Image (cartoon, grey):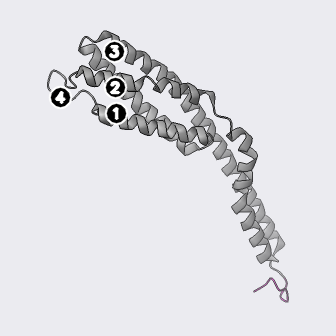
Amino acid sequence: MQKTLLILCGFLLCFAPAWGAQKETPAAEKTPEFLVRYSKLLEPLDAAYASLESENLPLLAESGQPVGRHPIENRRAALAELRDTLDKLHAEPRNLTLATKLFIQSESLTDDLYDLAQIAYDNDREELGKQLSDLVARLDAERDSIESYTLVLAQEKEDRISQLEAENAKMRQQIKQAGPPPKGSPDRE
């Protein structure tokens, strides 16, 4: 009997997360509104990067040290990776790993855009600098939404883990209380 109960408990523990995920499916299909806004905010970046490339602004400080973190090609690759993460999160909005990755990538993007805005201002390209600064401010606001969303997902996952641990402890206690099966029982081996 104890062996059967252990097998049943193992089965329940293996499939409990899947059952929990099935309950969340309707909510999982709904894409959070901030993801749509964030996608739209990224649209002008390709044009801004092209403008920076054609302007051939120096990426060096007066001392000759690099001011920008990456060349434009690297920034475009990082943007493509961010968009890929965003697309995956659209498809799987309850994925904590993707939400965290998006938050980190967004932080990096806003840092890079801030650097580029400063480079534009330093080179008397006020319009480009303002465009980039405005974009940084808008991305910062959306990054706050991403951060809040990520924290909510993390709390949900933590609550689910706590619930499963409590269920596991309860089942272990029930197994202990049941005691070993009688000596002649087929479950005892």
Q: Report the residue marked by disc 1.
A: 75
Q: Amino acid at mark 4?
A: Gln
Question: How many neighbours does mark 4 have within 10 angstroms: few (below 14), some (14-19), or many (20 or more)?
Answer: few
Front of the two marks 4 and 3: 3
Q: Report the residue marked by disc 4.
A: 65
Mark sitting on residue 127: none
Q: Report the residue marked by disc 3.
A: 129
Q: Amino acid at mark 2?
A: Tyr
Dividing the picture into quarters, in which one does residue 27 lie? top right
Q: Disc 2 on helix, strand or loop?
A: helix
Front of the two marks 4 and 1: 1
The answer to whether the residues at label 1 and label 2 have Cβ atoms under 8 Å apart is yes
Question: How many neighbours does mark 1 have within 10 angstroms: few (below 14), some (14-19), or many (20 or more)?
Answer: some
Marks 2/4: CA distance? 21 Å
Q: Disc 1 on helix, strand or loop?
A: helix
**Magenta segment includes 186:** yes
Res 83 visible: yes
Residue 94 drawn above or below residue 68: below
Front residue of this view, candidates 95 and 41: 41
**Magenta segment includes 141:** no
Mark sitting on residue 49: 2
Q: Amino acid at mark 3?
A: Gly
The answer to whether the residues at label 4 and label 1 have Cβ atoms under 8 Å apart is no
Q: Residue at x 15, y 20 (%)?
A: 62
Marks 1/2: CA distance? 8 Å
